[in-house]
Image: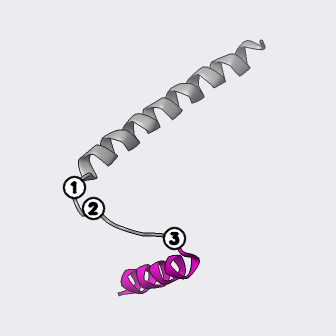
Amino acid sequence: MAIQIFQLQYLQERYHRGIAVTTAGQVFTEDVADFAFGLLLDVLGRMLASDRYVRSGS
């Protein structure tokens, strides 16, 4: 119930600001999950590279 109320307030606020909100249901769920996981791997890889750079003293 709380989620539905939050979503209603969210949608009302977007409507008042003139921001379009839409949904595609389950159509892109797997693609979005794959993309999010890829971004996570990229961030972790850069964090490790950054850590090595800082520890090397360069």
Q: Position of residue 30 (x, y in %)?
A: 24, 47
The amino acid marked with disc number 2 is Ala
Judging by the rendered image, the residue that carries numbered circle 3 is 19
Name the residue beneath numbered marker 2: 24
The reply to whether dot 1 and dot 2 touch (C-beta < 8 Å) is yes
Query: Which residue is drawn at the image coordinates 40% and 85% (left, top)?
Result: 2
Q: Is residue 10 above or below residue 42?
A: below
Label 2: how many Cα within 10 Å (few below 14, some 14–19, many 20+): few
**Residue 21: x %, y % from top left:** 42, 69
Q: Give the residue at x 45% y 79%.
A: 11
Q: Is residue 47 magenta?
A: no
Q: Are marks 1 and 3 in contact (CB under 8 Å)?
A: no
Q: Kindly report which numbered mark, 3 or 2, lies closer to the viewer in this rendering.
A: 3
| Image location (x, y in percent) of residue 43 | 52, 34
The answer to which of marks 3 and 2 sits earlier in the sequence is 3
> On the rendered structure, is 18 left or right of 31?
right
* Left or right: residue 52 compared with residue 6: right
Nearest to viewer (mark 1 / mark 3): 3
**Mark 3–mark 2 distance (CA, rounded to whole Å):** 17 Å
**What is the magenta range?**
1-18
Q: Secondary structure at mark 2?
A: loop
Among the two numbered marks 1 and 3 on one chain, the one whose residue lies closer to the N terminus: 3
Residue 42 vertical position relative to residue 15 in the rendered view, above or below:
above
Which residue sits furthest left?
27
**Residue 16 drawn in magenta:** yes
Give the residue type that dot 3 points to: Ile
- What residue does disc 1 label? 27
